[in-house]
Amino acid sequence: MDLGLRGKVALVSGASKGLGRAIAHELANEGASLVLCSRGKEALTDARDRIAADTGAQVIAIPADVSRGEEIRELVRASVAALGRIDILVTNAGGPPSATFDALSPKMWDEAVRLTLMSAVELAAAVVPAMRERGWGRVINVTSIAVKQPVSGLMLSNSLRAAVTGFARTLANEVAPFGVTVNNVMPGYTRTERIEEIASAIAAREGTSAEAARTRWEAEIPMHRFGEPRELAALVAFLASERAGYITGSSIAVDGGWIRSLV
């Protein structure tokens, strides 16, 4: 299937590892040119070099902390200067710390708001106006299964990824007449470093082991396995494509059946 991404330009945040890197690789495989960003320069450079070598795509890397609005604005300015425009925006940021309500301070809430919610808002604010003017664009936010079924111990993620969903659903209606779609993908338990971090945090709180946490999660998943980053990336590439032009305002799970709701 030709997704029509050849010649498009995509900006992927949090792209140095995990889901963001897998998404960037998949978009490059489909012929898109890429801007990758993350805070860690060394890992980001490695991602750029490997994706470019594997796919032959044009890939540039720009270090940026998406929890800081001024760095987002500079990131977008540099991206447009290098590649001319941004057709596809994938907002993705490392998840906030695993914690229960009584363990959270006001500072932790503030930092999580900037990282999880405001990064998506400010990236969209910097990119969407030009998409509207051109009459074409794709915004895809990486959220979480926690949006539909809260995960114990993830107070920050449960709260703020739901906020991203409300923002995206409202934005989708506002920009739909201009050929711009806005969708969310909700990864379930996926084999990334983030899963290991959460498992270790839960083990510390419960006095068990990270392996016990992973085993419990696998038992809850109808497929009895964790997802692979490439499985989420395939959905993102489709939502970014010409073929998905009539899909907007949706939140789609890639979770092996973990969410138990009907819709």
Image (cartoon, rainbow, N blue to C red):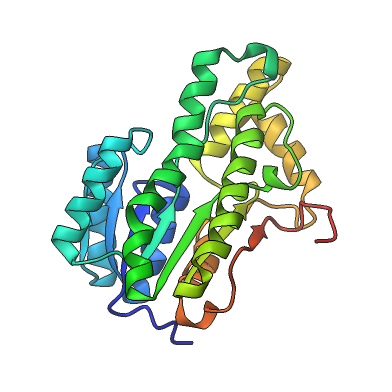
Which residue is at a point 50% across and 37% down the rendered structure image?
Answer: 116
> Of 173 and 242, which appears nearest the observer?
173
- In the image, 77 versus 104, the foreground residue is 77
Q: Is residue 243 left or right of residue 163?
A: left
Q: Residue at x 66, y 36 (%)?
A: 158
Q: Where is residue 171 shown, x and y percent of the image? A: 53, 57
Q: Quadrant of the C terminus?
A: bottom right
In the image shown, does 142 or 233 lie closer to the viewer?
Answer: 142
Decide if residue 14 is in sight here.
Answer: no
Horizontally, residue 94 falls left or right of residue 30, namely right
Compared with 211, 187 (above or below) is: below
How many numbered marks appear? 0
Residue 51 locus on image (x, y percent):
29, 61
The residue lying furthest to the left in this view is: 81
- Please say if 167 is above or below 129: above
The location of residue 192, given as percent across then percent down, is 51, 44
Residue 174 rendering spot, x and y as whole percentages: 53, 62
Compared with 32, 41 (above or below) is above
Can residue 249 be seen at all in this image of the molecule?
yes
In the image, what residue occupies the spot 62% across and 53% down? 186
- Among all residues in the image, which is located at the extreme bottom? 1
Q: Residue at x 23, y 64 (%)?
A: 52
Decide if residue 33 is on the left or right side of residue 19.
left
